[in-house]
Amino acid sequence: MNRFAVGVRSNVRTFLRTPLNVVLALVLPLVVIEGWGQAMAGLPSMPTVEAIPLDLGRVLGAIFGVAIIAGLMGLVQMISAREADRRLVQTGYSPRTLLATRLATLAGVTIVVAGVNFGVLWLTVEPEAPLLVFAFLALAGVVYAFLGALVGAVLPRLFEGSLVVVFLAMMDAFLSGDSPLAADVPDFVQYFPLYHPKELLQSAVFDGTFAAGDLAFVGGYVLVLLVLVTAVFGATMRTSGGWSA
Amino acid sequence: METTTAPTETVGESKTLVRGNALEKTYGSRLPLGRSTPVLTGADIEVRAGEIVGIVGENGSGKSTLMKILVGVLDHDVGTVERTGTIGWCPQEPLLYDRLTVSETFRLFGAGYGMSREEIDAAKRRLADELDFERYLDYRVDQLSGGNRQKVNLSIALMHDPDVLMLDEPYTGFDWETYLRFWDMAQDLADDGTAVVMISHLIEERSRLDRVFEVRDGLVHDVTDEETVSELRSDREGDDE
């Protein structure tokens, strides 16, 4: 039997049979998008940003909502069954195949979560380029899914790992966003995981365009995260002998 | 640390399938002032085809550590491990995926072993029948009782007909009937040439073992011929007569 296909099916079943995952993926977007929008609605408009604070808040809420759910899913995927994973690797799964099943599942779930966020955003903001908006939300989600997976591989504890992911996503969304509360942020913020996805999303929502440089940066970011998570996961799953036939 | 999968030599009629030489293992702390605990300090062991080997020892003596090293799920610091053939490992705590059903668990691990769908289904039917858990095949692992979960845990180790079976107290939670059936299975496997290695705490079981190793002070001692084992053997032989 195809190990990759069986692994992905098992991961998807595990995800769907965890009700909290499904509820979070479906309910959180509405809460976060509208909550973030209303939180920024009372702020004054900024001279350099044409969008009204309410819509800008909703866009930031959407990207934060995708990022935090995808990040937590990535974390949980990596640490929920670490010892069972080790046994599975010993049966014959290579760590790379096992990781590939996890990341493929994560990417699929992230696309669904991005779709829900996109739906809410479409109803409330009416973006200029809907397809691009969906694609960039999914891209932001993939960045955080892989980041969550990396955190899970390095720090295999649910509580501590969740704190890292949640704190990072909140700080990232806040500093990367064009909020008057986060004006004059330092230059290094442009290296934060959500900075360029946010630029892409904002352009797609309000102008219907995007900058190729931002897209390339995000692509590179995903690649680097992929290399790091593969290396760390491979190291943690390294054992001295498989026993498959 | 060295591990090979090259075949080892034949001793008498039996081929040596697993051998650990001068194994050392210390659990260290990642913190600068943390304590490190030496568990194995030069353990030697070999397991031959067709025998049932018991590993005994006090709590914390290093039995599970030794087995994990022999299986290959734990790295050793010093020494060598040689293995040949396929290995089935039944850990003390069931290492399974809670949200998958029993049938899905067989498929996932069967795919890992490189088995076809037909082989997996056949193994599932055979083991579910032998260990009496057919009616739970569509239950999720987290919905099973401890005993049934342990049956699945054991079945995953057995499903690919391994050459060496490594069992870490595999009968925890078994009822008496299942316990007896388990020993029948172990004996049948040994008769067919499978090497069965088992961590055990029960003195009663010594009479069922071909050889007994005790892990003590970081070393492995062959205690097969010690009094208790001999007496139990002769008792059993007397009963059989």
Image (cartoon, coloured by chain):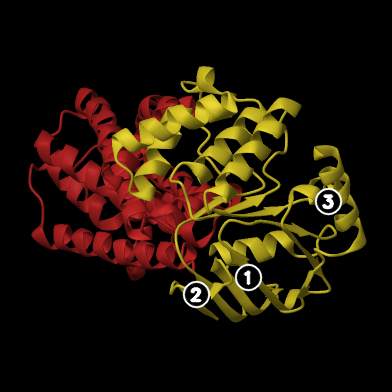
Chain colours: A red, B yellow
Query: Is A16 on the left-hand or right-hand side of B135?
Result: left
**Of B76 and B192, the residue lying toward us:** B192
On the image, the x and y values in percent for residue B120 come to: 37, 36
On-image quarter of the N terminus of chain A: top left
Q: Are marks 2 and 3 on the same chain?
A: yes
Name the residue: 52% across, 25% down: B129
> Are the residues tagged 2 and 1 within 8 Å (C-beta)?
yes
Which residue position holds label 1?
B46
Which residue position holds label 2?
B8
On the image, the x and y values in percent for residue B137 come to: 48, 23
On the image, the x and y values in percent for residue A31 come to: 41, 27
> Are the residues tagged 2 and 3 within 8 Å (C-beta)?
no
Q: CA distance from mark 2 to mark 3?
A: 30 Å
Tell me which chain the residue with mark 2 is part of: B
Q: CA distance from mark 1 to mark 3?
A: 22 Å
Q: Earlier in the sequence, mark 1 or mark 3?
A: 1
Tell me which chain the residue with mark 1 is part of: B
Tell me, for residue B233, which label it has, or none. Answer: 3
Q: CA distance from mark 2 to mark 1?
A: 10 Å
Residue A89 versus residue A5 in the image, above or below: below
